[in-house]
Image (cartoon, rainbow, N blue to C red):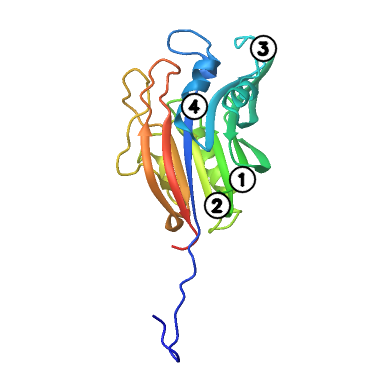
Amino acid sequence: MLLIGATACIQPEIQTSRLKVLSYNIHHGEGTDGQFDLERLAALIRAQDADLVALQEVDQGTERASGRLQAMELGRLTNMQAVFGKAMDYQGGAYGEAILSRLPILETALQPLPHSAGAEPRAALAVLVQLPDTGPDLWFVATHLDHLPDDTDRLAQAEEIRRWLVRQGPDAPMILAGDLNAVPGSAPMQIFEQDWQMADEAFQRPTFPSDQPKLKIDYVLFRPDTHWRVTEIEVVGESVASDHRPLLVGLEFSGQP
């Protein structure tokens, strides 16, 4: 009860947004059984009910993928918006990253990443979306770093991504997802951890290879860490659709720390 003459302190309502993020290296659509099966991949993606999906090793119109535009087909099969980012030309088509989104896409950007002569080109693909429940705009970034044992290119690529994204400002909400080909604590991950928080830092569940995962090389990271809370983490138990297992993370964004 409010008494006459008393003052009331009304706390402002804290806006929160919840979303689910999936990171999945789809091995150019080919499963460990040797079958190219986009319908199988789409069914798996749909079952996770993710709002944002980062896909790596995506073929667009290549000979080995029978000319299929995998990003667009997966978008159609999942009823999500699809964006493809080319890292390199390959077999008459292109190879790179893709993003699927249930959220309206406001802007897209593609950043080529440095690589040594003779190494596979790599890229980072980003989309600007608005978080649910009238939340702020969010940059969602999908990438796939170099896979060679020497981490020279991975280090350069991690630094380039960091430089590219830091320009958005220290408080801009961002999520970075993908196959970083680096284990926790490695030098490339130390670069990311200067600005980013690993969603499953306390668990570090392995994601590769899909039949018997031993290495954690697939990630979902976010910033600023004071505004995010992890609500769910799962390495999806699928061993055939790709040589990686998908990583699913639930997140909640709050406008106040």
Q: Secondary structure at mark 1?
A: strand
Name the residue nearer the viewer: 102 or 190: 102
Q: Earlier in the sequence, mark 1 or mark 3?
A: 3
- The residue type indicated by label 3 comes to Gly
Q: CA distance from mark 1 to mark 3?
A: 30 Å
Mark 2 lies on residue: 133
Mark 3 lies on residue: 67
Residue 198 picture quarter: top left
Q: Earlier in the sequence, mark 4 or mark 3?
A: 4
Residue 212 showing in the rendered view? yes
Q: Secondary structure at mark 2?
A: loop
Mark 4 is surrounded, within 10 Å at the Cα level, by few (under 14), some (14 to 19) or many (20 or more) other residues, namely many
Q: Nearer the viewer, mark 1 or mark 2?
A: 2
Residue drawn at point x = 42 percent, y = 23 percent: 244
Q: CA distance from mark 1 to mark 2?
A: 12 Å
Q: CA distance from mark 3 to mark 2?
A: 39 Å
